[in-house]
Amino acid sequence: MRWRDRYGLRRRRGLRVAKFDREATDADIEALIEFAKTRRGVEFYVEPETFATDTTAVAVAHDGEWTRRRVGSPAVIAKVARDLALPVYDVQLTGYPARMRAYNERRRQAQDSDPV
C-alpha cells in the first residue's frame, strides 16, 4: 500500500529545504501503524521539525514501550491517528508520558544487571 500518497508525504516534498537527515518514507509510516496495531493503549506524540530532522512521531504503548519515526508533517500523523482512532498529542504541550520514562529506566536497569 502506498502510504505516501494517502497521507500526503509526496505533496509536501516540494516545500522542503536541505537537511542533514533523510525525509519520511512509506516504511516510517508503516512502522508506526504496525506498532499501533500490535500493542494496547498506543498514543502518538508529535515532535517538531528541526533544521536537521523532519517532523517525527513517538508511538507509546500502555506499558511505556515506544518507537520514533519520521512522519513528514503533523498532518500526516494526525491522519494516521484518525484512521486508527488513536489520540495524538503535541509533545511540546504535553511532554512525554511518565510510563515512557519508566520503561526506559526498566530497560536501563536490565542492561546494567545483565552480565556481559
Image (cartoon, helix red, strand yellow):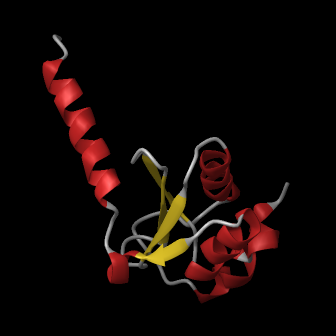
What residue is rendered at 74% in x and 77% in y?
Answer: 8
What residue is rendered at 70% in x and 75% in y?
Answer: 79
Q: Looking at the image, which is closer to me, 86 or 12? A: 86
Q: How many marks?
A: 0
Residue, far top? 115
- Classify residue 63 as left or right of residue 112: right
Residue, far bottom? 15
Where does residue 14 sit, x and y in percent of width and height?
A: 66, 85
Q: Looking at the image, which is closer to me, 90 or 102? A: 102
Task: Give the answer, above or below, for where 116 lies relative to 93.
Answer: above
Task: Give the answer, above or below, for where 31 lies relative to 74.
Answer: above
- Classify residue 6 as left or right of residue 104: right
Task: Give the answer, above or below, for where 100 lies relative to 116.
Answer: below
Q: Is residue 51 visible?
A: no
Residue 115: quadrant of the picture: top left
Where does residue 63 sit, x and y in percent of width and height?
A: 42, 44
Where does residue 2 sit, x and y in percent of width and height?
A: 82, 60
Residue 106: quadrant of the picture: top left
Pick the quarter of the image with the C terminus.
Answer: top left
What residue is rendered at 62% in x and 49% in y?
Answer: 31
Pick the quarter of the image with the N terminus.
Answer: bottom right
Q: Looking at the image, which is closer to me, 71 or 86? A: 86
Q: Is residue 15 visible?
A: yes
What residue is rendered at 35% in x and 77% in y?
Answer: 94
Residue 49: quadrant of the picture: bottom left
- Classify residue 107 as left or right of residue 18: left
Where does residue 4 sit, x and y in percent of width and height?
A: 75, 67
